[in-house]
């Protein structure tokens, strides 16, 4: 079983940037797809984006397309979420998750392993 740990969250002003990291331990997850999800206060969990095992297939939610970028570094066993032009509505707990079947889907139930999440707060 792979363990995932997110980091990089914090407080940022609107228009600013943050880079979140999702580091895997326990075993390599180079063959897994990885998704990012978020849950804002009083909201349901929302798909942000996902990347397949090789990194050549990436999907994004419409709400973040053009502002967020997902990438992965197999040597570091880490997936990144670069967030630019942040808005107050991006405020949420951001979590990464691994799909051992490699599907990089947008549904949370397709994912097998989850991190604990990291808080992102965007001030207006």
Image (cartoon, rainbow, N blue to C red):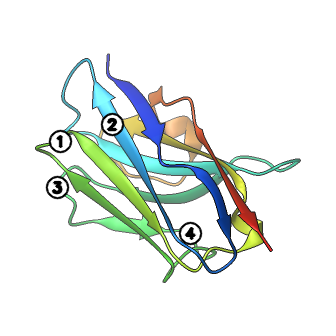
Q: In this view, does 37 lie above or below 23?
A: below
Give the CA distance from mark 4 to mark 3.
Answer: 20 Å
Callout 1–callout 2 Cβ contact below 8 Å: yes
Quarter residue 26 falls in = top left
Q: Percent from the top left, x then y, of residue 25?
A: 28, 24
Q: What kind of element bears circle 2? A: strand
The label shown at residue 76 is 1
Which quarter shows the N terminus? top left
Mark 2 neighbour class, 10 Å CA radius: few under 14, some 14 to 19, many 20 or more: many
The residue located at (48%, 83%) in the rendering is 66
Nearer to us: label 4 or label 2: 2
- Judged from this view, the residue extending furthest toward the right is 42
The residue located at (64%, 50%) in the rendering is 38
Q: Which of 61 and 81 is in front in this view?
A: 81
Residue hosting label 4: 61
* First reached walking from the N terminus: tag 1 or tag 2: 2
The residue located at (46%, 41%) in the rendering is 7
* First reached walking from the N terminus: tag 1 or tag 3: 3
Mark 4 neighbour class, 10 Å CA radius: few under 14, some 14 to 19, many 20 or more: some
Callout 4–callout 3 Cβ contact below 8 Å: no
The residue located at (40%, 29%) in the rendering is 4
Mark 3 neighbour class, 10 Å CA radius: few under 14, some 14 to 19, many 20 or more: some
Q: Percent from the top left, x then y, of residue 94?
A: 59, 47
* First reached walking from the N terminus: tag 3 or tag 2: 2
Q: Which of 80 and 30 is in front in this view?
A: 80
Q: What kind of element bears circle 1? A: loop
Give the CA distance from mark 3 to mark 2.
Answer: 16 Å
Residue hosting label 3: 54
Q: Nearer the viewer, residue 28 or 104?
A: 28
Callout 4–callout 2 Cβ contact below 8 Å: no
């Amino acid at each position: 079983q792979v363990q995932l740990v997110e980091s990089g969250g914090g407080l940022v002003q609107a228009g600013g940037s943050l880079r979140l990291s999702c580091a895997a331990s326990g075993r390599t997850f180079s063959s897994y797809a990885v998704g990012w999800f978020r849950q804002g206060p009083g909201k349901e969990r929302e798909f942000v984006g996902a990347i397949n095992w090789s990194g050549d297939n990436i999907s994004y939610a419409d709400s973040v397309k053009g502002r967020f970028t997902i990438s992965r570094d197999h040597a570091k066993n880490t997936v990144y979420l670069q967030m630019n032009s942040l808005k107050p509505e991006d405020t949420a707990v951001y979590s990464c998750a691994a799909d051992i079947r490699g599907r990089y889907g947008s549904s949370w139930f397709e994912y097998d392993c989850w991190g604990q999440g990291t808080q992102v707060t965007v001030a207006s």
